Image: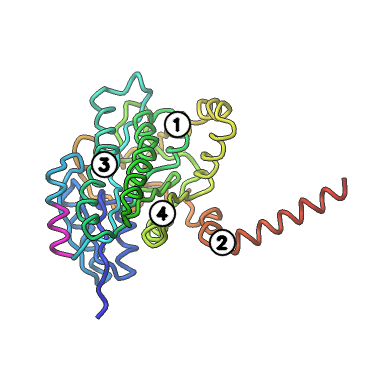
């Protein structure tokens, strides 16, 4: 008899976390969701259950390590051994660094970095004794390039890469088969921006290009099956990575010039959707998508090439042939 595998997702009540939960459920996985908002979790549970798999939810704040450990134990008792743990819970607070309140800056650090460390510690306590399992850290394109108006968020995503590299090296040194990987999404159309705190006069918004969360859900699912160190999703993510390695000074100026106004809007629908959830859970269950459907992409050429190695090879061959032909004409 086939035994279904189990995935646990923090921040599973909305956005990327919920999109990933639905994707795993469609593939027959048992799904455990952890989040701060009980109402959002209940609705998420019903959505995931509609695919016929087992689902269980636990209310917990990732900054509370004791409660997080209790939630993980309850989920494992309900669903079976944890095969994959996704550290997805995250928040942001928008505004210039000198204008962001100290307690808000600290809260972003606590949720995004300390919360991920807590989740990693709990996941390892279940996986290391069995010497198997995968921990997926949801990082960001911002892990490669900090952006204005999100100093705290940028700090946490940069730190998350270093944290993951350190823990991965420790596991390799002890001969553990537990795998750690990072998924780096671009700007994604989720309620993240509605839930973010802000001291700006305008509402926060993702800078273009924006992608739908289902693309990231697929990336998370692939990360659960293929042991790679990192997964970059979207051309902007790859652009940030390469650009900051090759011309960081230029990106400083571009980020300063474009990064401020592209992350703000007075659009009525975006303003109406504001439901900040920095210090407590957002009030209204929000689902997977944010208020940016009309301008969001449902596909990514970069991601398609990344998951289709033969296509990458063919594209490289074509590019080489074109370059060779051009050089011969000179």
Please, what secondary structure does the residue beneath circle 2 have? helix
Q: Determine which residue is flagged by label 4.
A: 216
Label 3 SS? helix
In this view of the protein, which residue sits in the foreground, 323 or 296?
323
Upstream in sequence: badge 3 or badge 2 = 3
- In space, the residues marked 4 and 1 are separated at their CA atoms by 21 Å
* Nearest the eye: 176 or 145: 176
CB atoms at circles 3 and 2 under 8 Å apart?
A: no
Q: CA distance from mark 2 to mark 4?
A: 19 Å
Q: Does residue 215 sit above or below 265 in this rendering? A: below
Say which mark, if any, is on residue 309.
2
Q: Which residue is mark 1?
A: 147
Q: Which residues are magenta?
A: 71-79
SS class, disc 4: helix
Q: Kindly identify which residue carries mark 3.
A: 117
Q: Is residue 78 magenta?
A: yes
């Amino acid at each position: 008899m086939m035994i279904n595998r189990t995935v646990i997702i923090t921040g599973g009540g909305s956005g990327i976390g919920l999109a990933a939960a639905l994707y795993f459920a469609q593939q027959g996985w048992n799904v455990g969701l952890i989040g701060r908002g009980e109402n959002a979790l209940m609705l998420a549970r019903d959505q995931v259950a509609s695919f016929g798999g087992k689902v269980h939810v636990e209310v917990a704040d990732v900054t509370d390590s004791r409660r997080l450990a209790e939630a993980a134990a309850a989920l494992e008792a309900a669903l079976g051994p944890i095969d994959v743990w996704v550290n997805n819970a995250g928040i942001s607070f928008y505004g210039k660094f000198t204008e962001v309140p100290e307690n808000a800056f600290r809260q972003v650090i606590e949720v995004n970095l300390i919360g991920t460390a807590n989740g990693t510690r709990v996941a390892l306590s279940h996986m290391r004794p069995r010497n198997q399992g995968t921990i997926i850290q949801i990082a960001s394109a911002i892990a490669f390039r900090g952006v204005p108006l999100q100093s705290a968020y940028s700090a946490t995503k940069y730190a998350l890469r270093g944290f993951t590299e350190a823990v991965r090296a420790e596991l390799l040194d002890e001969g553990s088969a537990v795998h750690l990987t990072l998924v780096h999404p671009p700007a994604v159309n989720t309620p993240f921006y509605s839930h973010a705190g802000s001291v700006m006069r305008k509402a926060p918004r993702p800078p273009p290009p924006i992608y739908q969360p289902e693309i990231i859900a697929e990336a998370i699912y692939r990360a659960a099956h293929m042991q790679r160190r990192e997964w970059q999703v979207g051309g902007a993510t790859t652009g940030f990575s390469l650009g900051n390695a090759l011309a960081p000074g230029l990106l400083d100026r571009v980020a300063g010039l474009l990064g401020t106004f592209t992350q703000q809007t007075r659009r009525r629908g975006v303003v109406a959707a504001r439901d900040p959830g920095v210090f407590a859970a957002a009030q209204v269950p929000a689902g997977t998508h944010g208020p940016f459907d009309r301008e969001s992409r449902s596909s990514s050429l970069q991601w398609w090439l990344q998951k289709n190695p033969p296509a990458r090879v063919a594209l490289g061959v074509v590019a080489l042939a074109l370059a060779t032909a051009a050089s011969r004409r000179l």
